[in-house]
Amino acid sequence: LPVQDGEAWQHVLDTASAEPVLSEISVGGALLAERVTAEAARPFAVESETPLRAVLFTAEPDPVEPETERPETADAEFADAEAGAPVRQTLLLVLHHIAADEWSLPPLLDDLAAAYAARLGGVAPHLPHLPVDHIDLTLWQREVVAAHEDVDAEYWRTRMSGAPEQLTLPWARPRPARTGGPARTHDFGIDAELHQRVRALARRTRTTTFMVLHAAFAATLSQLGCGDDLVIGTPVAGRDDVALRDSVGFLINT
C-alpha cells in the first residue's frame, strides 16, 4: 500500500512478487519465546512490504556451565544438536489485518497442516480449489452496491442524522485530536449461570444471545453518561455465501 499525497492506494502485485519470504533464525532456547514475541509485534512497512511474513526459528541448546550437572535428557539434546538434528523449530506466521480477518485463520491453518503432512509423506500438497476468488467477490460487491447505492446512502444519512461523533464517556484524560499507537482490547468471561439466563431471555424475547448482550452493553454506556443516542459498531463476517467460507482475506464489514 504505497502512499501518495498522503493517501494510501492499493498496488496489486503479481503472484511471484507477492510470495512471502521465509526467514530462518537460530536462537538460544531460553530466548525463543522472547524473539517470537518481538517478531510478532514488529510493525509492517505496508508501503513496501507484503502483508504476510514467515519466520522459522530453530532453537539451539543453551550452554551449560561445566560444573553444573545435567540430566541424561540434556545429554541427549546436545547429542542431537551435535549430530545436526534441530532441537526445536517454531514457524511464525504474521499476517496483517488488512489482508485477513479472524475467519481466515481456520482455513489458512488447515491448508498449512495439509501441506506439512504432505511434505512429510514425500508428496506435493494438493489443496482444494476455491470456487470464488477475491476478484469475483469484488465484482459482485461492486454490482450489488451500484444497484442500491443511492437508496442505501439516503437511508443511512437519515438514520445517522444527529448521531454523536464520539461517546461522551467520563474519560480519565482528554481524548487526543488524533489517536495513535497500538490499540487495546478487554477480554472477560461470563459464568455458566449468567450465560443460561442470557439465553433464556433471548428465547423469551425471540432474539439472539448477541442481541441481548448488545442491549446490555448499550444500557451500560447509557448509565455511564452517553445518553440514549448511541452508535455501536459490530464487525460481521461477510461470509454468508458458503463459497466464501474457506477464503483467506479481509471480508468483514461493520
Image (cartoon, rainbow, N blue to C red):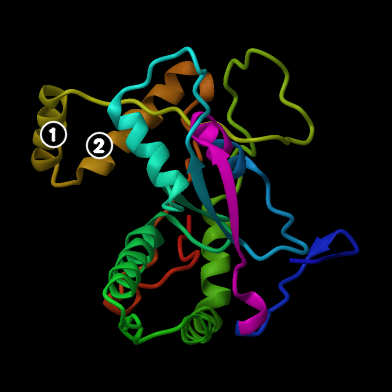
Residue 3 relative to residue 139: left or right: right
Which mark identifies residue 201? 1
Position above or below: 107 against 241 = above
- Along the line of sight, the residue nearer the viewer: 19 or 159: 19
* Amino acid, disc 1: Leu
**Percent coordinates x, y for residue 55 in the rendering:** 56, 54
* Amino acid, disc 2: Val
**In magenta segment, residue 85:** no
Task: Identify the residue at image location x=47%, y=35%.
Answer: 61
Circles 1, 2 touching at the beta carbon (< 8 Å): yes
Which mark identifies residue 100? none
Q: Can the viewer see residue 234?
A: no
* Residue placed under numbered mark 2 in the picture: 212
| Stretch in magenta | 16-36
Position above or below: 152 against 197 = below
Task: Identify the residue at image location x=25%, y=37%.
Answer: 212
Q: CA distance from mark 1 to mark 2?
A: 7 Å
- Along the line of sight, the residue nearer the viewer: 220 or 175: 175
Number of residues whose C-alpha sits closer than 10 Å to that of mark 1, classed few (under 14), some (14–19) or many (20 or more): some
> Residue 170 occupies which quadrant of the picture?
top right
**Percent coordinates x, y for residue 81 in the rendering:** 44, 45
